[in-house]
């Protein structure tokens, strides 16, 4: 790894939800989370549902304040016409009253860009996800996979340093999911974005990421971190990847058996 | 080897990509032509029964004039200039009352829907004022404004206001929280930005439904407001009924129905254009 300044530096992050039933009025969901993400890295965070993965992304995006700890973000050059983060949710979350093009341009509004420029960038992002010909459609006219592609285009349109994805393929059927996984890898290669990818699908994490971080426990902590050296394009049935996925699964079930969760 | 899928295989039941799945029999619509025909038959049957009742002597024609007598009464009313004058006056009341009541109701509803504090602050006042029907305000309308168009407009505004207020309030409160989070995530964090980009479009369907209800309610209020003497369609109807000119009363009833129908049709066309993004 090149020793450049990290794109994102998360230090000693703790997260709690208000909980009137507990003695101190809150429940700690995530404790002492540290992560340093290099530019261009693809990181997957895996863990069971409710472990606080999604909340972690929201903290990094500044949507939810942390209870303690810091998130430092190295801005890449001028940020005119850009936003630091692009976020993709599990549901495509398109605005039904906007055309596909206007949905993609959503994040470009308020950046001081002229309308023609917003339009050009929206269409550029749509072309990246292979939906250039759907720009004038309404969201309800698209399939689930297409909608999620539009959501990805919307996140890419703001030219973010960091693309954050919250179980983006979790609601799709298996075939569409595989297609979109490969498309995402292709996009990542072409745009050299840094990606923070949250999923509960260990196979997906191992197939996509450079590093897989396992969150478990209550409050959740980082239980393991694996670097995947396999060169891309990777085979889905790659033996080393399968072995790693099995190891991660075993760790998770050990933690569950051992009352760690 | 490729051969067409035999119809008994499950794959054959799938619709071609892009094709809509045909609706079930329960939702199946009869063809448009027959629906129009049935609607027309219904109107004819209604007119026939109405015509028959006074003609067969079941009711005296002065109590219920037959529909065949109406065109003549209408022509006379137009010739005398009374019809045009009454319509213009009433339309003036209608439009002002509708615009003020709708804009005010929607604005108040949207603001209240966006602020929990404002909702709490107004909740008891609203609960107190809401059940008072517009007509109950007639005494105050006369005391404050006299028997003037302003008094009529005031009554109409009150009727329209609450409908739009509650429609807008409910619509704004029902806006999907996830969409507001989306706005935050993409940099639209200020209240005005959220209002314009998320809340108003998301609430537009229910707000438009409220507006449409108001369009009808306002016509009712027009008649009610004019019955106490403000010049217009309602006043003309009262005059006619005191002279037992029931055919003229019906002329104005039909006029109102016609105007309401036109306004509603125009509104639906506009709404469908605005809501063409709906599936």
Image (spheres, rainbow, N blue to C red):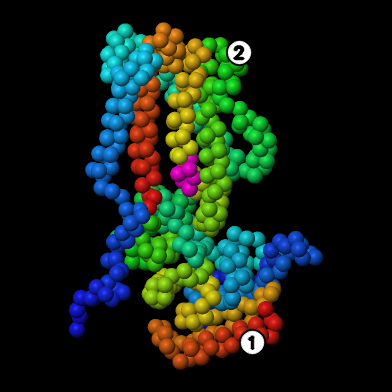
Magenta span main SS: helix
As helix, strand or loop, the secondary structure at mark 2 comes to helix
Q: To which residue does mark 2 refer?
A: B143
Mark 1 vs mark 2, foreground winner is: 2
Which residue appears at 64% of the width and 78% of the height?
A: A216
Task: Write down the quadrant of residue A238 in the picture.
Answer: bottom left
Q: To which residue does mark 1 refer?
A: A254
**Considering depth in this image, is B161 or A243 the residue closer to the camera?**
B161
Residue B81: give x, y in percent of width and height.
33, 9
- Check if mark 1's residue and mark 2's residue have beta carbons within 8 Å: no
What is the chain letter for disc 2?
Answer: B
Q: Is residue B115 visible?
A: yes
Residue B249 is marked as none
What is the chain letter for disc 1?
Answer: A
Residue B88: give x, y in percent of width and height.
38, 17
**Considering depth in this image, is B141 or A168 the residue closer to the camera?**
B141
Image position of B155 (left or right of B84): right
Which residue appears at 33% of the width and 22% of the height?
A: B53
Image position of A37 (left or right of A108): right
Distance Cα–Cα, label 1 vs label 2: 81 Å
Is A30 one of the magenta-colored residues? no
Q: Are marks 1 and 2 on the same chain?
A: no
Give above or below for B86 relative to A123: above
Q: Which residues are magenta?
A: B201-207
As helix, strand or loop, the secondary structure at mark 1 comes to helix
Which residue appears at 56% of the width and 51% of the height?
A: B189
């Amino acid at each position: 790894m090149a020793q450049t300044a990290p794109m994102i530096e998360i230090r000693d992050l703790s997260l709690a939800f208000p909980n009137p039933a507990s003695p101190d009025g809150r429940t700690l969901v995530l404790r002492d989370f540290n992560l340093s993400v290099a530019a261009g890295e693809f990181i997957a965070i895996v863990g069971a549902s409710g472990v606080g993965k999604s909340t972690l992304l929201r903290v990094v995006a500044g949507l939810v304040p942390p209870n303690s700890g810091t998130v430092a973000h190295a801005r890449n050059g001028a940020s005119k016409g850009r936003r630091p983060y692009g976020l993709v949710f599990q549901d495509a979350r398109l605005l039904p009253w906007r055309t596909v093009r206007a949905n993609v341009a959503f994040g470009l509004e308020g950046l001081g860009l002229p309308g023609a420029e917003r339009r050009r960038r929206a269409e550029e992002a749509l072309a990246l996800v292979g939906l250039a010909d759907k720009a004038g459609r309404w969201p309800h006219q698209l399939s689930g996979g297409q909608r999620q592609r539009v959501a990805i285009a919307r996140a890419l349109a703001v030219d973010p340093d960091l693309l954050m994805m919250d179980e983006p393929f979790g609601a799709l059927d298996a075939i569409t999911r595989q297609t979109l996984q490969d498309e995402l890898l292709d996009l990542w290669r072409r745009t050299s974005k840094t990606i923070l990818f949250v999923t509960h699908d260990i196979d997906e994490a191992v197939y996509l990421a450079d590093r897989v971080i396992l969150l478990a426990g209550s409050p959740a902590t980082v239980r393991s971190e694996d670097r995947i050296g396999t060169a891309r394009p990777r085979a889905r049935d790659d033996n080393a990847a399968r072995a790693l996925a099995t190891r991660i699964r075993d760790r998770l079930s050990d933690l569950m058996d051992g009352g760690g969760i | 080897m490729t051969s067409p899928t035999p119809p008994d295989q499950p794959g054959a039941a799938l619709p071609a990509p892009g094709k809509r799945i045909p609706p079930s029999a329960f939702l199946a619509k009869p063809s448009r032509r027959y629906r129009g025909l049935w609607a027309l038959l219904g109107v004819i049957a209604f007119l026939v029964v109405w015509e028959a009742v006074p003609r067969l002597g079941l009711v005296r024609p002065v109590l219920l004039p037959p529909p065949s007598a109406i065109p003549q009464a209408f022509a006379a009313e137009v010739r005398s200039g009374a019809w045009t004058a009454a319509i213009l006056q009433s339309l003036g009341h209608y439009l002002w009352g509708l615009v003020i009541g709708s804009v005010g109701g929607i604005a108040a509803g949207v603001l209240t829907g966006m602020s929990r504090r404002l909702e709490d602050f107004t909740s008891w006042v609203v609960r107190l004022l809401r059940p008072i029907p517009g007509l109950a305000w007639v005494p105050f309308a006369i005391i404050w404004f006299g028997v003037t168009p302003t008094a009529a407009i005031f009554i109409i505004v009150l009727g329209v206001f609450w409908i739009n207020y509650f429609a807008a309030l409910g619509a704004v409160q029902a806006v999907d929280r996830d969409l507001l989070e989306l706005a935050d995530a993409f940099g639209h964090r200020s209240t005005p930005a959220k209002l314009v980009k998320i809340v108003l479009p998301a609430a537009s369907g229910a707000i438009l439904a409220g507006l449409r209800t108001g369009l009808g309610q306002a016509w009712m209020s027009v008649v009610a407001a004019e019955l106490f003497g403000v010049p217009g369609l309602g006043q003309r109807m009262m005059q006619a009924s005191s002279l037992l000119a029931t055919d003229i009363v019906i002329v104005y009833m039909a006029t109102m129905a016609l105007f309401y129908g036109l306004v509603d049709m125009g509104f639906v066309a506009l709404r469908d254009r605005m809501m063409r993004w709906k599936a």
